[in-house]
Structures are given as C-alpha cells and as structure tokens.
Image (spheres, rainbow, N blue to C red):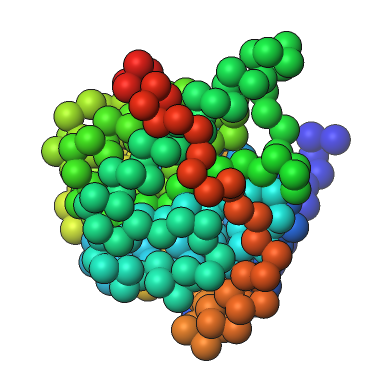
Amino acid sequence: RADRFTMRVIETDPHAEPIPWPGPSAKSVTKPVDIGISEDGRPVRVLLLRRNVLIGGTTGAGKSGILNVIIATLAACPDVILWGVDLKGGMELQPWAACFDRLATTPHEADDLFKDAVGWLNHRAREKAAQGQRTHEPSRDDPALIIICDEYAELPEESHDCADSIARRGRAVAVNLIAATQRPTQAAMGKNTAVRSQMDVRICLRVRERRDVDLILGQGSFNAGWQAHQLTQPGAFLISDPEHTAPERHRAYLIDDERVTRHAAQCAPGRPRLPAGGPDRSEEHTSEL
C-alpha cells in the first residue's frame, strides 16, 4: 500500500569505530564477498566472479585494508586460484604468499605472470570452444583465476598490454583482475584505456581532488553525488557496481596483521594450484594482444 512504509532506526553509528573482520563470508568465488558495513549497518557484498575490480584512493585511505579483506575471503574459496603482483618488493602481499599460487615482486616476474595469465586464458577459451561451452563455471577441479595487483601504475608496459587483454576477454573463462592504484590516470593504467573502461566494480576511498572521483568511479560521478573527497575515516569508501548504484558511504572491515598471519596459515594447505609450466607461451599471448 502506498500509505505504508518501513522505517529502520539506527541508534549508534556503525562506522564510529573500526569494524573487525568477522571471517570469510563465502566459501566459493561464485558467491558475493562481504567487504564492509554500510551507514545503516547492512553488510556490503560484492560479486567478484567474471568481474574486474578497480580500487582507488590516496595514500593512507585504506586500499591495502580492502585488498586484505578480499584476499582473506578468496583464500577460503577452493574454486579460485590467486596470483599476486606487488612491485614494492612484496611488502603488501607477502603475508598472503602461502595462499598465492604465484606472487610477482619484480617487473620481470610481473611480465612473466601476466603473459602466463593470457596463455591460460587462451588455453581455457579453446577448451570451452571445443566443448561447445560459452562460459567457464569454476569448480575445485577447474578453478577461476584472479590476479590481484597492488599499485597497478608501477607495472611495466608489456604487463599493461597483457592486463588489457585479460580485462577485455577474461570474463567468459573466469580470468579476472583486481587492481589497486592511487590515481587511475591514462598514464597509470597504461597506453590503452581498455583496462579502466572494463572495470565492472569501482571502489573509491578518500581522494584529494574532485577530479579523482571521476577517474575512479567514471566520468560525471562527482556531479552525480559521489563525493569521495569528503570521506574522512580510514577504510571509508564508495562502491559502484551493478548492485550498488547510489553514492552511499561504507566502511571496510579491518583485519589486523595477526589475523592475516593466522588465517593465511589455515587456508594455505588447501589452496588450488595451476600445473607448473602452463600452456606454451610461444603461441598463447602474442597473437591475442
């Protein structure tokens, strides 16, 4: 009836204090991942399967915190393989090293990792075509592949080219990218703009300038009310994806170093791995870029 409504009254601010991570919210990459709490206390859930993710914000805004929460949940999912790229020598992702099938910490290692990812993408695409299937459904025996890249702007140019290919073609075969960067300018995202335009999930933490909101969330976002420059709390963010279309303020869960160490040790023994060597790179990546 038009004359009735439901009202929820929040007596305390859910964002007043840091919000401890409650543990993994999913045991499969096919399920949404809880990354934080909204202003009215609802969990913020984001689906990562077949989606590329862009996380942006100024230094100290909480990018690493959100990455930790995402990795912590994915580490508990046996149907996804995790590859990591951390060109700060592994400072950010090293605590999760036991849960990564591969972790690149140098430009050369990053190039090899992205070339191999394109190789696996092409290999799986040919397999599905031969089977008459249009999409890959992840399972424990045939997992999805997600590449998590901290400080995306530091990637060498050849890695950018491979990431562009993955962003454009990886959805159907469940090979996707999660990229974190301070300002996703054209220079930071590589000479091609396809990576940024193919980001299905945009997470914007605090930024210094209004124009950075549009860089992360898309042209016109600031004028539409997505004012991330006004965020003040560490871990506070706005998210734009098919399930989140309004500029609501959220705060990410906090997972401390001790919890990271303990959780990584628990999840590492059951993590899936791709076969060593992989498909023949000599013909896998060059023809598709």
Q: Residue drawn 64% across and 21% down?
A: 127
Write the residue at 53% across / 78% down.
260
User: How many circles with numbers are drawn on the protein?
Assistant: 0
Viewer-proximal residue among 60 and 84:
84
Corner quadrant of residue 64 = bottom left
Residue 129 showing in the rendered view? yes
Question: With respect to residue 97, does 159 lie above or below?
Answer: above
The answer to whether 19 appears left or right of 5 in the picture is left
- Residue 160, percent from left and from top: 26, 36
Q: Residue at x 30, y 61 (%)?
A: 105
Q: Residue furthest left?
A: 187
Q: Is residue 275 left or right of residue 32?
A: left
Which quadrant is home to the C terminus?
top left
Question: Hey, which residue is sitting farthest right in the picture?
Answer: 1
Residue 45 visible (yes or no): no
Q: Position of residue 1 (x, y in %)?
A: 85, 35
Q: Residue at the spot x=49%, y=83% of the render?
A: 256
- Residue 140, percent from left and from top: 75, 48
Q: Is residue 213 above or below residue 75?
A: above
Most extreme residue toward the bottom is 258
Residue 267 image-quadrant placement: bottom right
Write down the quadrant of residue 156 in the picture.
top left
Q: Position of residue 111 (x, y in %)?
A: 28, 43
Q: Is residue 286 left or right of residue 20?
A: left
Q: Nearer the viewer, residue 164 or 98?
A: 98
